Image (tube, rainbow, N blue to C red):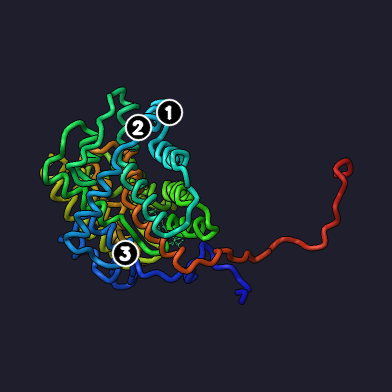
Amino acid sequence: MVMSTASKGLEGVVAAETELSFIDGVKGVLEYVGIEIDDLARNSTFEEVVFLLWNKRLPSQGELNSFTSELRGQYEISDTVLSRIKDLPTSAQPMHALRTMISYLALEDSDPNSTKPEEVQRKALGILAKAPAIVAAFDRHRRGEKFIPPDTSLSFAANFLKMLNGKAPTETMERAFDVCMILHADHGLNASTFTARVIISTLSDIYSTMTGAIGALRGPLHGGANEGVMVMLNEISSVAAAEDYVMGKMTRKEKIMGFGHRVYKAYDPRATYLKTLAEQLAKDTGNSDLYEKSHAVEQVMEREVAAKGIYPNVDFYSATTYHCIGLELDLFTPMFALSRISGWAGHGLEQLEANRLIRPTAEYTGPHGVAYVPIGQR
Ligand SMILES: CC(C)(COP(=O)(O)OP(=O)(O)OC[C@H]1O[C@@H](n2cnc3c(N)ncnc32)[C@H](O)[C@@H]1OP(=O)(O)O)[C@@H](O)C(=O)NCCC(=O)NCCS
């Protein structure tokens, strides 16, 4: 069956079946395997959510314990990976460093290409477990600081923050970061997840799948928007300046990063949760000004474009949240990636369960019957 016209940006095209996440863009609902995101953010942990996405059910306590210990057993990166990270230019952007090093992990796997589901899941676990060490090692390398080895007594969230900062986070910071990981884990057929499914549908390997997905994520229209939000907040000199700043951008027809969504025409439920988290963390860390600036931007946007269905998305308040957790601006998108690796893997496994090569058709809009002109006559 061939549809005769292209849908720009594939809007409205149903390109896969999934049991992983459900989005109702009109009501502003997101569920992972049927469980509301708010319920998971309040009651679950990132490790449990990863199990949920990879097994399509919640684990028993015993299953969660063994899954967590398998994950922790893979936290460490090899000396070779560490030394390749130290070879990277300190001027490199962390997303490029992460993409490069995830690709490099394939070189240390004696059988990188296996598409057997249990093998893919085992490799995905290794990638997910090692990605925090890669980001932290690169960040410390560019700051001229020594690598802090992973701590297998810590959760995914606490281990990352300890490797980054040299000391274990407070319980509040660990929980805040863990919640961010939960909220970013999966989101239907977003651009990077679609990329992941396309790559694995060719029966290519999980390392290529992750590498391609990271590349798609870093664009400013996708995961890169959280860094764009922070750039914008830094450009707004005060809460009072937010109105003119936003209106200036609107007049110039420039987009406000962290607003709008292809699917949500209502408030993104992840943004609802992050807004509350950002407000609390900002209070706790003396960053209330930043939160107030964000809120002022939101109020102008609400007045101007909410009627068009444009609301804050996941990236808007995650910028304030990450800043309050103490992360450098260009680590924001890698944080999204650390979490979304779980969703990409879940979709990769789901794609392999009933694989068919993803190969859509293009609507040809060029000329026909054009005669070839020899180069000397052009
Ligand atoms: C997410 C996004 C790419 C969705 O894009 P899309 O579904 O292709 O929608 P469009 O870019 O075609 O936008 C539709 C309309 O809304 C407007 N719009 C969308 N997002 C906007 C934003 N962030 N700021 C201002 N206007 C926006 C567009 O200008 C367009 O208006 P028009 O119909 O008058 O021309 C888009 O909203 C965007 O660029 N947002 C900013 C980047 C961002 O935060 N990305 C993270 C997404 S989770």
Picture coordinates of residue 339, whole percent (x, y): 31, 51
Instruction: Tell me if mark 1 has few (under 14), some (14-19) or many (20+) residues whose alpha carbon lies within 10 angstroms of its own.
Output: some
Picture coordinates of residue 299, whole percent (x, y): 25, 56
Dot placed on the residue nearer the N-terminal end, 2 or 1: 1
SS for tag 1? loop
- Please give the residue where the numbered disc 2 appears in the rendered image: 138
Give, as a three-letter code, the residue at label 2: Phe
Decide: marks 2, 1 in contact (CB < 8 A)? Answer: yes
State the quadrant of the N terminus: bottom right
Q: Is residue 236 above or below residue 62?
A: above
Give, as a three-letter code, the residue at label 3: Asn
Instruction: Tell me if mark 3 has few (under 14), some (14-19) or many (20+) residues whose alpha carbon lies within 10 angstroms of its own.
Output: some
- Which residue is located at x 15 percent, y 44 percent? 173
SS for tag 3? helix
Q: Tag on residue 16? A: none
Name the outermost residue toward the front. 110
- Please give the residue where the numbered disc 1 appears in the rendered image: 88
Picture coordinates of residue 338, whole percent (x, y): 33, 47
Name the outermost residue toward the top. 144
